[in-house]
Image (cartoon, helix red, strand yellow):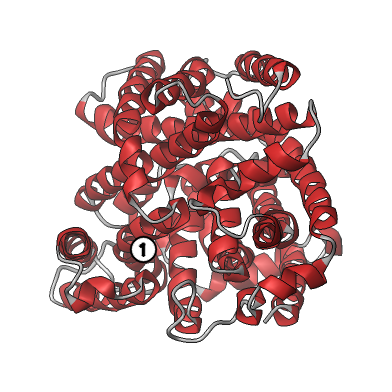
């Protein structure tokens, strides 16, 4: 153990906290039937839904990635955070009512209702790949990065296996209810710890004027030129919303939390609450990375900024508590992805192949699938070291997976002529193009197209898949009347909802709350434009 970074008190706090989280998760487990295990009995209230959404997103992966990117490229990384508030408003208005009313367990199941089984199986497969390569593997990598600083003599492989075991310890027996309740505790701890760290860092650098003395002015601006290597304004306008929509409105990992809501109002309030919680991230998760440029001007790996600040600036005890919360959040995030992935395997594949299985057997299948998935993710995790940074790895992969998926959800919701052929062929063509782009990026980096910014590539891929969708739909069999009536938007939905909201207090009216959220978001973006 590196005693220069952490002492015995910190280590004791970390161990006690992590063990406590496992038992707390088991205490809140729900596993009587498949709905309890995979969707926490659909009984969660809006604060739990909102904090769970926030905690699942602001895990160790995001904490480390935001600070690291702010250190190396500036605060433009915050564009992904404030855009989440805008996306969640759109999601709450248009998509969430259909998701909850349909009673689905998974997003691929929703695609089957709107299109056919081909789209469901494809999206299940892609989501599983994304869960392993993105959320689970990246979470393990972030946790191993921290523990490697503390225990330099232990191999990364051993550290990854230990973290994987901790994540699976309460996910396998307890299901999503265990995951959601532990996430609430971790979110509160990380929120408080990050605020303290921001204050201590600000004091250590001697004020914002010292930060600006070593930081180029463009690094503290959200709106960047078209050739900016981080977030060009064209990418912010067209690419970031696309990635955000996939992450918040289509991704099983995130949407599954909203599906736990006890009713539509709690689902909407929870989603908007999560959007509100994303806004202060600029001040206590992004700014510390920028301020760290004063203290550590020559860090070799930007991803080590956050743990370096914690180890150097916080007192004994608080270091252990924040590190425990960080590792537990990582564990919880991994647990959530494992649970959502096992839900996909169980409900989208096994249940269809073996329709005679009862709820108890389905839960057993989900538990076994979790074990296999965590081993696969642990095996892939060391490969992330080959990329420039953790955050760039995450965004690049999502940028290639997201466009065809967003196409079939957006067009399917708002275009009544969209059919099963349009969905399937746009998904397949998007996948093939993404594979080609990845091969060029890895093996032929000198080719021009492989050097395009992923925030430019993603919207171009979206346009291509949209063309395939429209052409295939026009030339294919029209969708069924049921699919159009139950899974596409129409004005009657809006007018009926308007009538139902008339007698509701303003603070319960999600439309008014959405306007407030958008105004706050606009003010922050305008100030730091």
| Image quarter hosting the N terminus | top right
Q: Is residue 346 visible?
A: no
- At x 59% / y 81%, what residue is drawn? 223
How busy is the neighbourhood of tag 1: few (under 14 within 10 Å), some, or many (20 plus)?
many
Q: Is mark 1 on a helix, strand or loop?
A: helix
- The one of 286 and 371 positioned closer to us in this rendering: 286
Q: Position of residue 49 (x, y in %)?
A: 66, 42
Q: In this view, does 331 lie to the left or right of 344?
A: right
Picture quarter with the C terminus: bottom right
Does residue 382 lie above or below 290 as drawn? Answer: above
Which quadrant of the figure has residue 491? bottom right
Question: Do we see residue 64 in this rendering?
Answer: yes
Residue 176, percent from left and from top: 54, 29
Nearer to the camera, 435 or 46: 435
**In the image, residue 388 above or below residue 488:** above
**Vertical comparison of 460 with 84: above or below:** below
Q: Which residue is drawn at 43% across and 45% down?
A: 252
Residue 347 x/y as whole percent: 34, 32
User: Residue at image x 81%, y 57%?
Assistant: 202
Residue at 40 percent across and 42 percent down: it is 106
Quadrant in the picture for residue 115: bottom left
User: Residue at label 1?
Assistant: 399
Indicate the position of residue 460 as horizontal and vertical percent values. 30, 78
Q: Quadrant of residue 475?
A: bottom left
* 424, 417: nearer the viewer: 424
Q: In this view, does 463 lie above or below 94?
A: below
Q: Is residue 148 left or right of residue 504?
A: left
């Amino acid at each position: 153990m590196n005693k220069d970074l952490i002492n015995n008190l910190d280590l004791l706090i970390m161990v006690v906290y992590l063990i406590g989280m496992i038992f707390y998760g088991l205490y809140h487990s729900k596993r009587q039937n498949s709905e309890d295990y995979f969707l926490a009995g659909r009984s969660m209230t809006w604060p739990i839904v909102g904090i769970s959404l926030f905690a699942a997103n602001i895990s160790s992966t995001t904490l480390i990635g935001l600070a690291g990117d702010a250190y190396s490229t500036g605060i433009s990384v915050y564009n992904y955070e404030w855009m989440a508030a805008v996306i969640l408003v759109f999601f709450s208005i248009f998509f969430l009512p259909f998701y909850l009313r349909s009673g689905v367990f998974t997003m691929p199941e929703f695609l089957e209702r709107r299109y056919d089984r081909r789209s469901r199986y494809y999206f299940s497969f892609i989501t599983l790949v994304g869960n392993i390569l993105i959320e689970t593997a990246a979470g393990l990598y972030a946790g191993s990065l921290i523990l490697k600083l503390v225990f330099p003599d232990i191999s990364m492989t051993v550290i990854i296996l230990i973290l994987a075991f901790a994540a699976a310890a309460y996910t396998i027996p307890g299901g999503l209810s265990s995951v959601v309740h532990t996430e609430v505790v971790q979110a509160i701890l990380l929120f408080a710890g990050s605020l303290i760290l921001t204050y201590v860092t600000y004091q250590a650098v001697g004020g914002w004027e010292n930060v600006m003395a070593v930081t180029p002015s463009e690094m503290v601006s959200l709106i960047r030129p078209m050739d900016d290597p981080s977030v060009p304004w064209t990418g912010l306008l067209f690419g970031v919303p696309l990635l955000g929509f996939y992450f918040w409105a289509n991704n099983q990992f995130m949407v599954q939390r909203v599906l736990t809501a006890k009713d539509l109002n709690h689902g909407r309030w929870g989603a908007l609450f999560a959007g509100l919680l994303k806004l202060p991230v600029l001040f206590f998760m992004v700014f510390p990375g920028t301020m760290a440029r004063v203290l550590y001007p020559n860090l070799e790996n930007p991803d080590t900024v956050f743990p370096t600040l914690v180890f150097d600036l916080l007192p004994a005890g608080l270091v252990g508590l924040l590190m425990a919360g960080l590792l537990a959040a990582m564990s919880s995030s991994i647990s959530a992805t494992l649970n959502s992935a096992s839900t996909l395997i169980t409900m989208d594949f096994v249940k269809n192949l073996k329709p005679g299985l009862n709820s108890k057997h389905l839960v057993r299948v989900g538990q076994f699938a979790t074990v296999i998935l965590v081993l696969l993710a642990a095996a892939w995790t060391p490969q992330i070291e080959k990329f420039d940074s953790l955050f760039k790895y995450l965004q690049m992969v999502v940028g290639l997976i997201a466009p065809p998926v967003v196409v079939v959800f957006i067009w399917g919701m708002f275009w009544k002529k969209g059919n099963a052929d349009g969905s399937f062929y746009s998904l397949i063509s998007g996948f093939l193009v993404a594979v080609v782009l990845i091969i060029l990026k890895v093996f032929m980096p000198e080719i021009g197209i492989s050097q395009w910014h992923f925030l430019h590539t993603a919207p171009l891929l979206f346009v291509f898949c949209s063309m395939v969708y429209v052409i295939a739909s026009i030339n294919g069999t029209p969708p069924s009347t049921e699919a159009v009536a139950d899974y596409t938007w129409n004005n009657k939905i809006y007018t009926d909802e308007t009538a139902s909201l008339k007698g509701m207090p303003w603070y319960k009216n999600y439309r008014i709350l959405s306007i407030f959220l958008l105004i706050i978001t606009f003010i922050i973006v305008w100030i730091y434009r």
